[in-house]
Amino acid sequence: MSTSARSRATQLGAIGFAAVALGCAALAAYLLARMMDAKGYSKDKVHPVVVAKRALPAAQPFGEEDLTVVQWPESSVPPGAVSDPKALFAGNKTPVPTNAILQGEPVLPARLAGARQGTALAALVREGYRAVAVKADDSVGRSGLVYPGAFVDVLATVKDPNGRGPSTRIAVADVRVLAVELETDVATRRPKTTDTGGMGEVSQKNIYQGTVVTLEVTPADAEVVSLVAREGKVDLALRNGADRAKVDTKGAIPLMFSAFAPVQEDGAPPPALSLLQTAAEQNAELKKVEKGSAAAKRKEGKGRISLDAVRERSDKIETYNAR
């Protein structure tokens, strides 16, 4: 074979190889495009967005180390999103979420407490309301009965100032729970933990020594809750989230469930109010009887002459003997 023939064969082989390579590249690009379409990839432009590196609880400050920047599809970037974490800390301010921000969720300035709103729980309290912390029973913490955002009735158990025993009534109804212990958002709530003191290990066993619950109340109701917490005992009754109805109860006293309590025709326990009135009337009658008895004794005592008094007077009488 001549040199020119071999040269032509080499050129044809190179052209064929190049054609095969181009065909393989086109096939690979086609398959890759199909795979990206199947996985939901699009050709939209991306934009850097600051998101939470971990779950950020409401009313708790966070730092720049708790944030990260990810590439977000430009067509779905939330309004107000920032691309630089430093923008959230401008002016040396400490940002505080007003609601929980989950891991991977964009951190928006609109969801952070402003300078006029304050920080921590103050940012969660609505205008015209007050935050009051009360200590509830251990059962509230163990059962998970209340949670941030729940609505409860505050039950007050106090002793009667006239000595008629304890009674329980709903002191404040339809109250919003702002926080349970330090947790202010149900989305980021975690069980309480304690250090075991050995080898630096942390036990996940829940510890309960009374549960502190922060309630949002009106100024007038704040006075009621504070009085009950100081003079009696507070319990919380969970409401249905959609139940805003007002209730009117007559309270409860131990005598209602005593075997000595009056029995109504329907067999139901008599109202606490009527029992208290009955007890008050009985006490009043008893006091009248006691007062009358004491007066009778005093009157009876006035008509008698004390023998000791006679003897004392006789000792002072001088006698004269006739001569």
Image: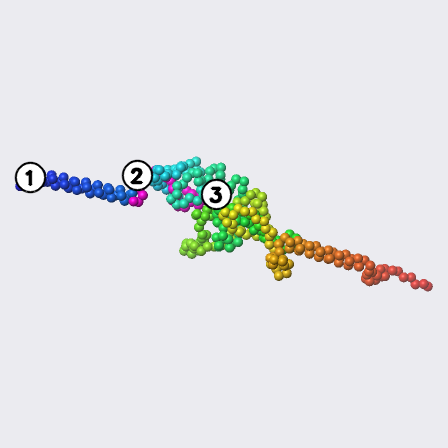
Residue shown at 37% from the left, 38% from the top: 77
Which of pointers 3 and 2 lies earlier in the amino acid sequence? 2
Q: Looking at the picture, tell me which residue is in the foreground, 173 or 129.
A: 173
Q: Quote the CA–CA distance across marks 1 and 3.
A: 87 Å
x, y percent for residue 205: 44, 56
In terms of secondary structure, where does tag 3 sit? helix
Q: Is residue 286 a member of the stretch shown in magenta?
A: no
Type of amino acid at the residue the image marks with label 1: Ala
Q: Is residue 278 visible?
A: yes
Mark 1 neighbour density, 10 Å: few (under 14) some (14–19) many (20 or more): few
Residue shown at 64% from the left, 58% from the top: 262
Color style of the picture:
rainbow
Which of pointers 1 and 2 lies earlier in the amino acid sequence? 1
Q: Quote the CA–CA distance across marks 1 and 2.
A: 49 Å
Type of amino acid at the residue the image marks with label 2: Lys
Checking the image for residue 43, the label placed there is 2
Q: Foreground mark, 1 or 3?
A: 1
| Residue ID for mark 1 | 5
Q: Is residue 49 a member of the stretch shown in magenta?
A: yes
Q: Which residues are magenta?
A: 38-63
Q: Foreground mark, 3 or 2?
A: 2
| Residue ID for mark 3 | 120
Check the image and name the residue furthest to the right: 323
Q: Secondary structure of the magenta portion, mostly?
A: loop
Q: Quote the CA–CA distance across marks 3 and 2.
A: 42 Å
Which of pointers 1 and 3 lies earlier in the amino acid sequence? 1
